[in-house]
Amino acid sequence: MRCTAEAYRLKRAHGIALRLSTRGCPHFRRLLAQGVELADSNLDTYAQTARRPLSPHLQVYRPMLTMMMSITHRITGGGLYLGTLLLAWWLIAAASGEAAFATASWFMGTIIGRLILFGFTWAIFTHLLGGIRHMIQDSGRGMEHPQREYLAHMMCWGGLGLTILAWIAAYAAR
Amino acid sequence: MSEKPKASMRTPLGQVRHFGSARSGTKHAWHMRVTSIALLPLTLAFVWFLLTVVGKDYASVRAAIANPVWSVILLLFLTVSIYHMMLGMQTIIEDYVHGETAKTWFLMLNMFFCAVIGLALVYAVLRIGFA
């Protein structure tokens, strides 16, 4: 990629660290497409596009529970997004007729189906507790050292505990 | 000529690009929070419904969905959660897809997916409810 090459050249020549995402910056690309020389006179422009403070990302952190739970919140959210496909299949089958419903219901009853349903409920509870954690921290509370660890533990183990409790309770109530 | 130029809060780059605030900066974050509070009770009810109903026979499942109280709870849960997940996936796409063209397409796909799946779910519940 031409922009990447330019970014490395700039870095070598002027010691300016360019984010890789600069490649996607339309302003930067437009300048390159116009054949603007990356000379000293243009450096101010580049500095504005490219010399933003770099946020440290995953690879520089030691894994910690608070950070793992933040990622878990996003992953469970994405999982639930896809899980709606299964829910839609089951509900539409129930609305379509007996034969379609039999197939969907059979799948839910298999080991794989039950595992998916268990994972789906686990994702729901963990994401729900993650949301409560977000709300508490939105209010400015629970950010200090021991409290933020408690909240992460609450989300991690609470999600698992609520899932098991809900399955036991639901099976007892059937 | 003699008019004093207004002081601008914009950065020089922002002035050149002419992309300013559309006055909707907090809408996404606020809707995320409102829907998540609404979803607290709705989700608990939905999980209970799902775990007590999945695996039952055709007639019992349809009767459970057609129960007016459960129909309304299900419709509320489905519409609010689909909107919530559309907002959430939008954030994920904006965070990880950097190319402008790809980002635009993914954001559109996200809305289409949520519209189709949301409408299908709601239609299924209504159809069983009115049957």
Image (cartoon, rainbow, N blue to C red):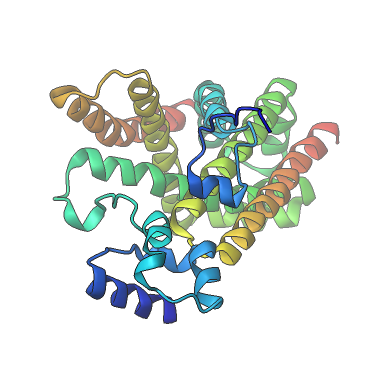
Which of the 4 image quarters holds residue B60? top right
> Nearest the camera: A28 or A57?
A28
Identity of the residue drawn at 19% across and 40% down: A65
Percent of width and height locating residue A37: 44, 77
Looking at the rendering, in which quadrant would you find the C terminus of chain B? top right
Identity of the residue drawn at 28% across and 41% down: A69
Looking at the rendering, in which quadrant would you find the N terminus of chain B? top right
Residue A130 lies, with reference to residue B37, above or below; the image says: below
Percent of width and height locating residue A143: 24, 25
> Nearest the camera: B6 or A65?
B6
Q: Can you see residue A91? A: yes
Percent of width and height locating residue A75: 40, 49
Identity of the residue drawn at 49% across and 62% down: A25
Q: Residue furthest front?
A: B2
Q: Can you see residue A80? A: no
> Nearest the camera: A94 or A37?
A37
Identity of the residue drawn at 67% across and 37% down: B61
> Nearest the camera: B68 or B58?
B68
In the shown orientation, is residue A82 left or right of residue A155? right
Q: Residue furthest right?
A: B131
Please state the total of marks drawn on the protein image.
0
Residue A38 lies, with reference to residue B120, above or below; the image says: below
